[in-house]
Image (spheres, rainbow, N blue to C red):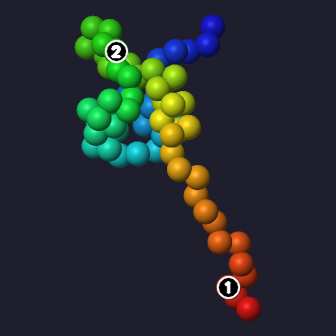
Amino acid sequence: MERRFLTIKETKAAIPVSHDKLYKLIKAGKLEVRKLGRRTLISVASIERLHDSLPRAEIDRTDRAA
């Protein structure tokens, strides 16, 4: 069975952001959160949507050593 939710700790490992930044993403509604008792669980689908919404980085591949 594919996992649908991650704990806070697992989410921080999946998207390496600070504790404060993770909670800001939750508060902004960018990550879907569920509660199971005292545990906070984050939807894997919302993590994937966040990833897909990030802008692509433009990398300058010119050789600067020359």
> Is residue 60 left or right of 37 when viewed as pictured?
right
Which element is circle 1 on? loop
Which element is circle 2 on? strand
Give the labeled residue for mark 1. 64
Nearer-the-camera pick, 1 or 50? 50
Q: Residue at x 27, y 8 (%)?
A: 37
Question: Residue 63: x and y, percent?
Answer: 72, 82
Nearer-the-camera pick, 33 or 57? 57
> Is residue 39 left or right of 64 when viewed as pictured?
left
Give the labeled residue for mark 2. 34
The quadrant the C terminus occupies is: bottom right
The answer to which quarter of the image holds residue 34 is: top left
Q: Residue at x 26, y 32 (%)?
A: 27
**Precedes in sequence: disc 1 or disc 2:** 2
> Is residue 26 left or right of 45 when viewed as pictured?
left
The quadrant the N terminus occupies is: top right
Amino acid marked by disc 1: Arg
Give residue 36's mark: none
Amino acid marked by disc 2: Arg
